[in-house]
Amino acid sequence: MITGKYPKLRLRRSRKEDWSRRLIRENTLSGSDFVLPIFLTEGKNKKNEIKSMKGVYRYSVDNLSSIIDRALKNKIPMIALFPNTNKKLKDAYGTEALNENNLVSRAIVTIKKKYKNKIGIMCDVALDPYTSHGHDGLINKNEILNDKTIKILIKQSLLQAQMGCDVIAPSDMMDGRIGEIRNELDKNGYEKIQILSYAIKYSSSFYGPFRNAIGSKNLLKGDKKTYQMDYSNVHEAIREVALDIKEGADMVMVKPGLPYIDIIKEVKNNFKIPVLAYQVSGEYSLISNAIKNKILTKDSIYETLLSFKRAGANAIISYYADYLDKILK
């Protein structure tokens, strides 16, 4: 028996019943908190599972309705398109990125024709899905060329805008590209199109399954450490965000997600701008494989996703977004 003076406040009182826990809950998840990534592939009526990402598929353009209808049912506000470009179409300059009949262009036109503005479309701006060397920019003597790459990224952004993309998302990490893209979009009458900057994209080992999904993993020569961020640094991340906001970014991304929860919090505390977290392919695969092998339970998915909201993320790009009806239940 406890004797003597005892605190009048018992925090466990509020945890006793489910209704009470729900009543005072600080953070929750809904479909509106998610962006669904979709991988594209050539062909007709295709839905091919990605070996390195069980439960995630590549879809042909004519078969996108199956996944988009599910996204709308789950009240997801935006999808993100990533192409698996035919290897024969890749070259050192990423020429296919500027083809108005490429996978992303055809997908945008098809989705807008059927769904109008019922769901937003985010398009990745980078050259790695299109280059024969797997890098996000042009190369000369093993150096990634910043300014010459930006000239191509501008054209890629304008093409995506012309096709009907709602949110341009540069993930290339070239210095100054947000301002240049914003200027050209405005100059060409696309001032209403938003820019989601991958302001903080670390040179991470968690991208492997994604690179396999878009077909760049085995093509990549060297690494991306000269343009993606050093994962030792926090203050540099804040500088990156400050620069991109000044250049006209409407939203910013922190990528990867879970290993960089502290960065999400830092950005949110320093800037009053929408912040998105990308739960990347490596995170997805680790959790899914752990669940498959009964190391973790399925509850770990919800717990992990909620951690992004608790850290301050406005939205989460996650491959689990295709299973929200089960996860949020």
Image (spheres, grey):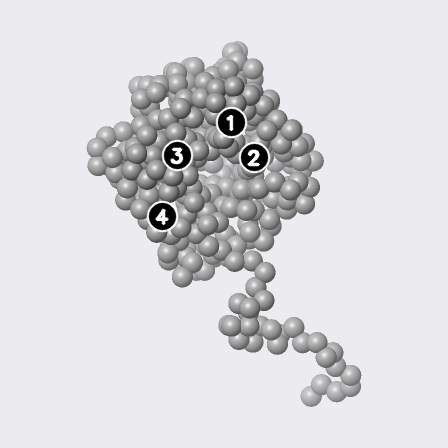
Give residue 191's mark. Answer: 1
Give the SS element for disc 1. loop
> CA separation, marks 3 and 2?
19 Å
Residue 53 appears anywhere in the view: no
Tell me if label 4 and label 3 are in contact, CB under 8 Å: no
Give the SS element for disc 3. strand
Of labels 4 and 1, the one closer to you = 1
Name the residue: 25% across, 38% down: 63
Q: Earlier in the sequence, mark 4 or mark 3?
A: 4
Q: Earlier in the sequence, mark 1 or mark 2?
A: 1
Find disc 3 in the rendering and name its residue. Answer: 81
Q: Is residue 254 or residue 104 the one in the foreground?
A: 104
Name the residue: 35% across, 26% down: 105
Name the residue: 53% across, 43% down: 277
Q: Earlier in the sequence, mark 4 or mark 1?
A: 4
The extreme right residue here reads 5
Residue 287 at what x, y percent from top left?
45, 50
Amino acid type shown at disc 4: Leu
Amino acid type shown at disc 1: Glu
Q: Is residue 197 above or below residue 267?
A: above
The extreme front residue here reads 189
Residue 327 at what x, y percent from top left?
41, 57
> CA separation, marks 3 and 1?
21 Å
Query: Is residue 222 left or right of 247 when viewed as pictured?
Result: left
Amino acid type shown at disc 2: Asp
Tell me if label 3 and label 1 are in contact, CB under 8 Å: no
Q: Earlier in the sequence, mark 3 or mark 2?
A: 3
Give the SS element for disc 4. helix
Of labels 3 and 1, the one closer to you = 1
Residue 92 appears anywhere in the view: yes
Find disc 4 in the rendering and name its residue. Answer: 72
Label 4 crowding class (10 Å Cα cut-off): few <14, some 14-19, many 20+? some
